[in-house]
Amino acid sequence: MLKYEKKVETKRNDEIKDFGELEVEMCQEHPENQVHIQKAIESLPDNEEISEMANYFTALSEPNRLKILFILKNGEYCPCELSSVLKCTKSALSHQLRILRDKNLIKSRKDGKFVYYSIKDSKICEILEKIIKNKKIKKEKKIK
């Protein structure tokens, strides 16, 4: 058994919960790899962070939401423009925009009676670019 201390920082009042020593069953095949296993354990984000990340990726799991993000990489768009490009109803678009906004992926700006949407963080654009680049590399490898 490998014993280690696990402390988890929560978002409430920046408190740190100490779960004391946790016991982890060691791999019987490679008992000499305790340091390797310890590094893996320490590199894991806490469960709350993992849940947040999973939530984030859930938002990216719907094709129309991905399309919206790819469109918004080019700048601000109003819902009329987005629904026109996506060929969907304003109601369906509104639902997708709300999910993306709730997941903090996009932001909105009101200008008079019009609302404009844009990507909240440029890192999202970087992620999208990496995904596309990776897909292109895989396609090129298949062709060869």
Image (cartoon, helix red, strand yellow):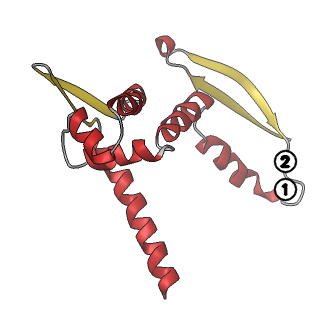
Q: Secondary structure at mark 1?
A: helix
In x, y percent, where is residue 89?
35, 34
Mark nearer the N terminus (2 vs 1): 2
Left or right of residue 134: residue 113: left
Residue at 33% across / 52% down in the picture?
126
Q: Is residue 134 above or below residue 94?
A: below
In x, y percent, where is residue 28?
90, 55
Where does label 1 land, which residue?
Answer: 31
The foreground one among 59 and 56 is 59
In x, y percent, where is residue 54?
56, 37
The foreground one among 62 and 58 is 62
Q: Is residue 21 above or below residue 1?
A: above
What is the CA distance from the residue labelled 2 to the residue labelled 1?
A: 7 Å
Q: Which mark is residue 26?
A: 2
Q: Residue furthest left?
A: 112
Q: Is residue 29 above or below residue 45?
A: below
Residue 124 visible in the current orientation: no
Left or right of residue 126: residue 39: right
Q: Secondary structure at mark 2?
A: loop
User: Circles 2 and 1: CB distance less than 8 Å?
Assistant: yes
Dot 1 surroundings within 10 Å: few (below 14), some, or many (20 or more)?
few
In x, y percent, where is residue 81?
21, 40
Residue at 32% across / 31% down in the picture?
90
Q: Which mark is residue 48?
A: none
Dot 2 surroundings within 10 Å: few (below 14), some, or many (20 or more)?
some
Residue 84 visible in the current orientation: yes
